[in-house]
Each structure stands twice: as structure tokens, then as C-alpha cells.
Amino acid sequence: MVEVKNLCKNYGEIKALDDISFTANSGEVLGFLGPNGAGKSTTMNIITGYLSASSGTVTVDGDEVLDNPRAVKSKIGYLPEVPPLYPDMTVEGYLSFLFDLKAVRLPKDEHIREVMCIVKIDDVRGRLIKNLSKGYRQRVGFAQALLGNPPVLILDEPTVGLDPKQIIEIRTLIKGLGKKHTVIFSSHVLSEVSATCDRVVMIHNGRIVADEKVGELSETISGSGMLELEIEGSATEIAQALNAVDGVRKVTRTASQCYTVEHDSDKDVRRAVFCAIARTDGAILMMRRGGMTLEESFLRLTERGEV
């Protein structure tokens, strides 16, 4: 749906973006991560057509941004970090104004009602935007991005300044929108990205340093998989059984009945581990995939400056 290929952006001798490429697929929520100054906002502005690239291409649903900017912009709903609201308008009046401004070709009243229902602001439709809470103003920003049912949504830090309850509500909204739209979602809250996104692209110093599914990122960085287990039985027999499993690299006993198993990333050893422990008459009380958290993966990549 969105293809970024060999994208570069120069400001004089400074390279804001250095030959980055990635794809956001249809129906996917893509997390776009990076420290301040990494190039996230520059990339989003180029995708939406607000900024031109020095070289490279951005294609949205078959249309290239520079060749057909009007068509591309009609396919994108954009929510910047600060929603573009008019505080002295009512919610419904603002959406009506944006509907006309975007030249949306849908039944006006019905479509606006539908959008307000999706983001749950129909109960404040007649209120002035300046009198709404930050959470509701953010929802109004979502509503304007959804006008016209664009297939692509670009969301820049959509939960900044919200309280925990509002963050959960917005996170649920984004996951729901991901079922019908391609969503590119920028955030500094890594746990939020982990809970919301299907895939994560990390950018550092203007270059892509990771492009993986969230659950597979730590394995790619460390080169190994990890299992965390709680096992009842003889510690000696359990350690011997685990070490004998094909693909297991290292077994560490972390507590009286707790073990960490490091294994080859290209092998799923769970069934073999289960069978090995069963032969010792031990009992697996808990087994789950472990490894680095998204925060640890992010720090590992950005601190060592991989390119």
C-alpha cells in the first residue's frame, strides 16, 4: 500500500534521510520509531506530500507522490502531533468544514455521523472544540483524518500528553482502524508500540536500523531465541535434558524452579523441550517466549548506531 524506496533528504551538507526503504502493507499497523532527530517526521512529511525528497520515491496505492500528488493526498488521512483544530468551531461544524475542504464525495451528514461514531465523539458533536478535554480533541483530530475513508492513516505521536485511560482508548482505536486501513504510527512510547503494532521500523541518524515484526525483533538483534520456563523436578536432570535438545545453546537456572533457555533463532524448540522434560518425570508449570523487550532492543540498536 505504501512503498518508500531509496529515500534521501539533504539540508545542505546534512543528511536527514540516507537511502531508506520500507513498505507498509494493506491492513497493517506499522510502528515507526527513532530518537529525536532520527528522521521520523521528515519521512512522514515526505509521504504525505508536505515535503519533497532530494531523491528516491514514495508510492501510495500505485500513485507516486511527485507524479500525482493530488491522488496520493486523497488516499491519506494525516494526524500530526498537534491536531489541526479550530477551537471556536463546534465538533460537527469543524468536520463539516473539513468535509467540504477535502471535497469528499460521500453522503455528507451520514458520513460525518459514521466518523463521529467510530472515534466516539458523537456525544460532544455540538460543543465548542476549545471546551473539550485533550483526549476528546485528539479524537476530533482522528475524525478529520478519517474523513473520506482514506486507505492510509499517518499518525504522528497520537497519544502525547494523554492520561493513562485516554492512551488505552486511543490504542484500542488505532488497533481497530488497522483492520480497515494501513496505519503508520509514530511514537516514543515503546510499550505502546509493542501493544499496538504488527511490525516496527526503527530509524537512527536517517537510516533504517531494523524492520521486523515486533515479536521477532529481539531474536534478530541477539541472533538467538529465548524461552522462559518454570519446571518442577530434579534440577540436575532438567538441566541435562534441556542441554541435550537440538538447537539449545545455553541453559541458565534463574531461581529454584525457573530456567532460561537460549536457542537458535531459526528453530522452534518448544515441542522438543516439552518431550525432554516429560522423559525426566518433571512438570512444566510455565513456558513462554522471552528475550529483550522492545525498549532494550531500541536502546541496543540506537546506542551502537547500527547501519
Image (cartoon, rainbow, N blue to C red):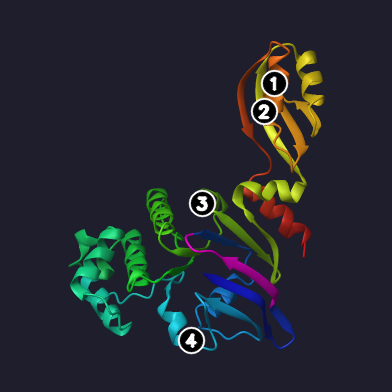
Q: Residues within 10 Å of mark 3 (few under 14, many from 20)?
A: some
Give the vertical position of 271 relative to 220 (above or below). Answer: above
Q: Mark 1–mark 2 contact, CB under 8 Å? A: yes
Marker disc for residue 114:
none
Mark positioned earlier in the residue sequence (3 or 1): 3
Amino acid type assigned to the residue bearing label 3 in the image:
Glu
Q: Which residues are magenta?
A: 17-27
Judging by the rendered image, the residue that carries numbered circle 4 is: 69
The span from disc 1 to disc 2 (Cα, nearest Å) is 6 Å
Classify mark 2: helix, strand or loop: helix
Amino acid type assigned to the residue bearing label 2 in the image:
Arg
Judging by the rendered image, the residue that carries numbered circle 2 is: 271
Amino acid type assigned to the residue bearing label 1 in the image:
Cys
The span from disc 3 to disc 1 (Cα, nearest Å) is 36 Å
Classify mark 4: helix, strand or loop: helix
How many numbered dots are placed on residues in this image?
A: 4
Judging by the rendered image, the residue that carries numbered circle 1 is: 275
